[in-house]
Image (spheres, grey):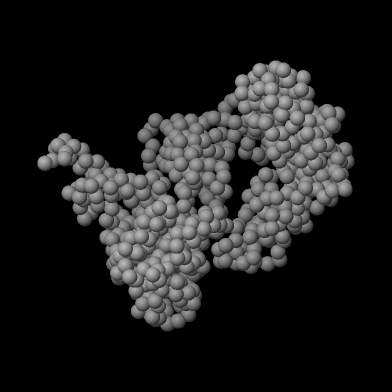
Amino acid sequence: MKLFNDDSNDKIKEKVEALKSEIERHNKAYYVDDKPLISDVEYDKLLKELQDLENRYPEYRDLNSPTLQVGSNNFKDTKFKKVKHRKPMLSLSNSYNIGDIIAFSERVEKILNDEKSDLEYVLELKLDGASISLIYEDGELVRAVTRGDGIEGEDVTDNVIEIESIPKKLKESVDLEIRGEIVLPISKFNEINEQRLKENKEIFANPRNAASGTLRQLDSSIVKERGLDGYFYFLVDAERLGIKTQSESIKYIERLGIKTTGVAEIIRNTDELEEKISYWEKAKENLDYETDGLVMKLNNMSLWEKVGYTTKSPRWAIAYKFPAKQVSTKLIDITWQVGRTGKITPVAELEEVELSGSRVKRASLHNIDEIYRKDIKIGDRVFIEKAAEIIPQVVSSIKELRTGAEREIELPKSCPVCKKELAKDEGMVDYKCINEKCPAKIQASIQYFVSRDGMNISGFGSRLVEKLLELGFIKNVVDIFYLYKFRDKMINLEKLGEKSVDNLLKNIEESKKREYPKTLYALGIPYVGKFLATLLAKESKNIDILANMTHDELLTIDGVGEKVADAVYNFFRDEQSRDIVEKLKEVGVNFLLDETSTPPKVESEFTGKNFLFTGKLKNFKRDEIKKIIENMGGVNLNSVSKKLDYLIVGEDAGSKLKKALELGTIKILTEDEFIEKIKV
């Protein structure tokens, strides 16, 4: 009896063929053109959909199906010489949750039966780079081959020779084949993209694409110039060398002078694995290379053959993928936000998509110049990612998917809120609304004032601020302290009520007693974040002394540079700003340092971390930056070592940067990135 009529079977076959065609298109874009059209997660979903259909309807599976292939068959037209691998370069099965890992472990135990009592696994980092196989003869590097389709790859030996970290001669005269990943360090990736933007060239979407594209350049000098790196994790036929476990092979690789990630941790159960996943999801942000997950391998190599292989993957290993850091979606429209300083910021309105474990439908586009440099249009398919795992931002458009219906993004001719004129300071990229009465600027400054790091007035959400401005109950931050006059009217507002209003008024009254550093921060002086507010409060003792300091006096404060001195000096020379400060003093807001107590210590991601800076700094004197680091709770070191957490890099950075990159565990920050972080 037929389960489906011919029409149904035709539709299933049509779906299978369509999926095959789509996946092959993406294989070529990813493996050959180094310009992916979708994210890894989206690709894996397509592959899983095809795999499920083929499992249910095996009559539609054939040997050329992408589910049975490694890499891409489309690399055949390459200009590089093709080389057959001595043993196939397989890929790993992917998982996105702990349930898949448990199922994997149970399958291994079932296959091994009586031998499962002493099972242990090695956990390694999964690098997001370009797969490579190196062949050494008598300790000399003789060939480097890409993965290709897993059976044969491209001979890129001349290019790999230009990668400084890959040894051309091993510490022992042995014959072996070693496999790993070629990566572009994140610090180099950012540096290259910054330069490409300056030259109006198309930027790389991510380090993996840049690494793969660079590795397949016909001009090997480009490889040397871009600074590729290599990490290795698999020794082919290791047992031939007397090695019995994967963990032993990693140590042997390192002994030969070959670079590994240094991560090869023994785990025996899924509880230990979950702990490691939790740790590495955060710790990976401190690495100078991209890692998109963890790999779990059966440690005992003698069991590998018993567990076996599928057509494209070993059954004794599995990859756990971290939540997607970069995904693609459609840019539906652009809205323009106005900040408390008047800065006009474009915000991308997106088709909702999951990114790093959360749903995202808006992302930052920074400024109009960046939009033009990246050639982003409304209607584009775009890649988005989370900057520092927090703020979604648009990375690039996928021009290959354009239909011609896309629209150019244009800067508003006037403020999108108050409709007054926009202006741009000389030498700056941001346009600003210069209307001091712009409702958006006032609302943003009030929300900043009442925020947790400022006056910390709970119950004062953005919607309430917007409503109170609309009703005319408040016009600036001073009016907050006169809201008690509108108590009865506020009680009748939607979703408030008597108890909520009374709690809000109580919190407003209590906020007058906040410490001087918090009230100073709440004023919103440009560049004065939590750290500098604490520093300025400690040095000035009260707001009057600070307000009357000259520019030169401000510069004598350790940790205050030209930008901060200019901002503070100009703020207190502005008539409207001084008027607000005076009125806040009149209502009882505290602007006096309590010298009987220690100023509040600011806890941050930098607290207890070790810092070092190198190169020429353009915004700080050396003593200034040391003082800022100490005020953040950080520790200044004198040299690069494994103890170092952050290296701040200025112009013409030299050996310290090189050593930090070699260690691979140190977070590299440009001076501008450091400034952005201390403004929080």
Q: Nearer the viewer, residue 230 or 642?
A: 642
Residue positioned 28% across, 53% down in the render? 67
Q: Residue 45 versus residue 579: which sits nearer the camera? A: 45
One can see residue 500 in this view: yes
Q: Quadrant of the N terminus?
A: top left
- Residue at coordinates 39% horizontally, 57% vertically from top-left? 102
Q: With 254 as the anchor, is 542 left or right in this view?
A: right
Decide if residue 104 is on the left or right side of residue 229: left
Write down the quadrant of residue 627 in the picture: bottom right
Q: Position of residue 427 (x, y in %)?
A: 66, 40
Q: With respect to residue 213, does 434 lie above or below?
A: above
Q: Is residue 111 above or below residue 397?
A: below
Q: Residue 19 versus residue 563: which sits nearer the camera?
A: 19
Q: Is residue 249 above or below residue 261?
A: below
In which quadrant of the rendered image does the C terminus lie? top right
Image-based side of 506 in relation to 216, left or right: right
Residue 231 visible? The answer is: no
Q: Residue at x 28, y 44 (%)?
A: 19
In the image, residue 18 lies at what x, y percent?
A: 26, 42
The total of numbered circles placed on residues is 0
Judged from this view, the residue extending furthest toward the left is 1
Residue at point 71%, 41% (across, down): 453
Which percent across, then down, holds residue 468? 68, 22
Give x and y (percent) for residue 476: 74, 26
Q: Is residue 207 left or right of residue 467?
A: left
